[in-house]
Image: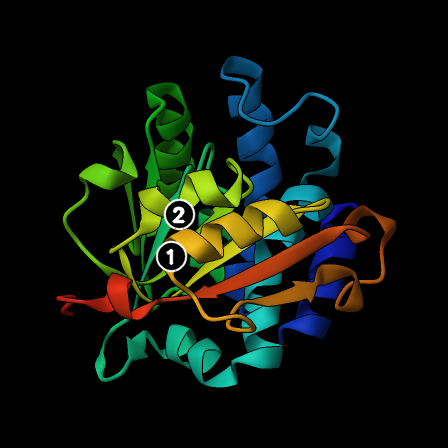
Amino acid sequence: MDYNGFITLAKSLLPGITPEMEARFEALEGLYNDWNARINVISRKDIGSLYMRHVMHSLAIAGYLKAIRPEMYEGLCSGRIDGCPASVLDIGTGGGFPGIPLAILFPETGFTLCDSVGKKTIVAEAVASSLALDNVKVVNARAESLDETFDFVVSRAVTALDNFYPWAAGKYRKSILYLKGGDFSEELCRMMAAARLAPGSVRTWKIQDWIDDEIFEDKFVIDIPASSASRKGQKH
């Protein structure tokens, strides 16, 4: 899918995309092609499918919120959740996914993009800077070392869910929104036990129901709510 196909689809699914957002989305292809030639953050076989496999996949988190949790979608649009500035932490962002596409879509919300691999954060920071995304902060650190808490943690399949949860525990007030494919039932059960989440509290949302494309056949947004343990002591 080229940029024109992407922006037509994105505007049909996520009304409210402004000309400034369109320009930023259009600039992504050139920026990632340039940086990927220097620092490989996107698979060589996938870079030609940037808009569908990476940008649209990232925006599935917004699609999920719009469809299932519209009050949170509106909160991210306005930059206010529960009367406070809205914030999102992207753990294991790599070159900036899903954080940068979401930051383009939600310019009023603050995004912190975190990765422990320095060369990846160089790319994410350069792309955010080129796009003049003043709502993005990039940090080269392990997520566990961050002191802040955020409304949401987002991530794109950086590891098994039960491995990921300790990195995010105590860092979010609302949910983890995790992009994951394949059969994740066993790791989800292990994570829920570790997080002390009640059966039925985690929602899985099939992306292909939003975008009918075989790329998303086995890909999901997983919504993992904050447990009472993870909310303890948290403040805005």
Q: Are marks 1 and 2 in contact (CB under 8 Å)?
A: yes
**Horizontal and vertical percent for residue 175?**
40, 65
- Label drawn at residue 39: none
- Label drawn at residue 195: 1
Closer to viewer: mark 1 or mark 2: 1
Residue drawn at 30 percent across, 79 percent down: 81
Up-down relation of residue 233 to residue 166 (above or below): below
| Left or right: residue 188 compared with residue 109 | right
| Left or right: residue 209 compared with residue 155 | right
In front: 151, or 187? 187
Q: Residues within 10 Å of mark 1 (few under 14, many from 20)?
A: many
Q: What is the CA distance from the residue labelled 1 to the residue labelled 2? A: 8 Å
- Label drawn at residue 165: 2
Residue 132 is at least partly visible in this image: no
| Left or right: residue 19 compared with residue 53 | left
| Left or right: residue 185 compared with residue 28 | right
Q: Earlier in the sequence, mark 1 or mark 2?
A: 2
In front: 206, or 30? 206
When asked about the image quadrant of residue 45, the answer is top right
**Horizontal and vertical percent for residue 235?**
13, 69
Q: Residue furthest top?
A: 38
Residue type marked 1: Ala
Up-down relation of residue 139 to residue 24 (above or below): above
Residue drawn at 44 percent across, 55 percent down: 193
Residue drawn at 63 percent across, 43 percent down: 54
In front: 125, or 144? 144
Q: Residues within 10 Å of mark 2 (few under 14, many from 20)?
A: some
**Horizontal and vertical percent for residue 23?**
55, 54
